[in-house]
Image: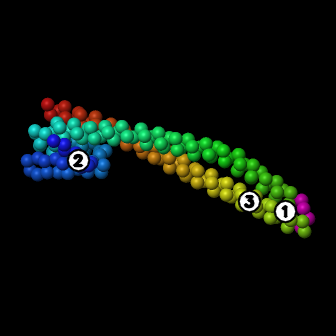
């Protein structure tokens, strides 16, 4: 009998029954897993090993899917960092051009400054645009790194849950 169907685990025991939405429940803190296995699954004498095996198998399948996420976020992070490295010299160059235009304007007589001002404003606008692009790339990089770290932590939590469940089930026999 399959106890996990469509991500929901159906457990029956002498006093009643329980359903677990696997994606919501796992990974779980240690004390919750202990409580689940000691007070619920242990009461189902005939089927507890099969229920346990299915839960572990479900978690192992989740762990198998995580490397795809890890690869995706790592590659996305590398792509964003590459874009940032390409954009940085352009920002520095445009900053120098703006500064040079300002310095040049400071030596001009008042009447000639109005001829250079539109050119300076254009460079400032371009510099502002480049800096906004860099800011967006930094946010993207931070997001990718955060998602990568979340996936890595999730993998560790699943492994810890499996280890704990295996330790708890050894005590039954």
Q: Left or right: 17 with respect to 151?
A: left
Q: Helix or strand or loop: what does disc 3 sit on?
A: helix
Using the numbered discs, state the Cα–Cα distance from disc 3 to disc 2 in whole angstroms: 60 Å
Question: Dot 2, how many residues are within 10 Å of its Cα: few (below 14), some (14-19), or many (20+)?
Answer: few
Picture quadrant of residue 57:
top left
Give the residue at mark 3: 124
Q: How far across and how far down the image is residue 67, in percent? A: 42, 38
Q: In this view of the protein, which residue sits in the foreground, 74 or 15?
A: 74
Q: Which residue appears at 76% of the width and 61% of the height?
A: 122
Question: Dot 1, how many residues are within 10 Å of its Cα: few (below 14), some (14-19), or many (20+)?
Answer: some
Q: Helix or strand or loop: what does disc 2 sit on?
A: strand
Give the residue at mark 1: 116
Using the numbered discs, state the Cα–Cα distance from disc 1 to disc 3 in whole angstroms: 12 Å
**Residue 118 seen anywhere in this rendered image of the structure:** yes
Residue 40: say if magenta: no
Q: How far across and how far down the image is residue 29, in percent? A: 29, 45
Q: Is residue 117 above or below residue 51?
A: below
Give the residue at mark 2: 5
What quarter of the picture does the N terminus occupy?
A: top left
Span shown in magenta = 106-110
Q: Which residue appears at 37% of the width and 43% of the height?
A: 154
Q: Are marks 3 and 2 in contact (CB under 8 Å)?
A: no
Using the numbered discs, state the Cα–Cα distance from disc 2 to disc 1 in whole angstroms: 72 Å
């Amino acid at each position: 009998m399959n106890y996990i169907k469509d991500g929901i685990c159906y457990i029956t025991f002498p006093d009643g029954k329980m359903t677990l939405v696997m994606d919501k429940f796992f990974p779980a803190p240690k004390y919750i897993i202990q409580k689940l296995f000691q007070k619920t699954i242990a009461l189902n004498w005939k089927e507890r090993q099969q229920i346990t095996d299915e839960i572990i198998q479900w978690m192992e399948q989740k762990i198998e899917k995580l490397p795809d996420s890890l690869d995706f976020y790592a590659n996305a992070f590398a792509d964003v960092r590459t874009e940032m490295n390409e954009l940085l010299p352009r920002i520095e160059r445009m900053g120098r051009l703006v500064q040079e235009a300002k310095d040049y304007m400071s030596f001009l007589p008042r009447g000639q400054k109005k001829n250079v001002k539109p050119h300076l404003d254009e460079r400032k606008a371009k510099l502002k645009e480049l800096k906004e692009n860099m800011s967006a790339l930094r946010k993207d990089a931070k997001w990718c790194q955060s998602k990568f770290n979340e996936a890595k932590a999730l993998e560790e939590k699943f492994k810890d849950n499996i280890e704990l469940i295996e330790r708890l089930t050894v005590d039954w026999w």
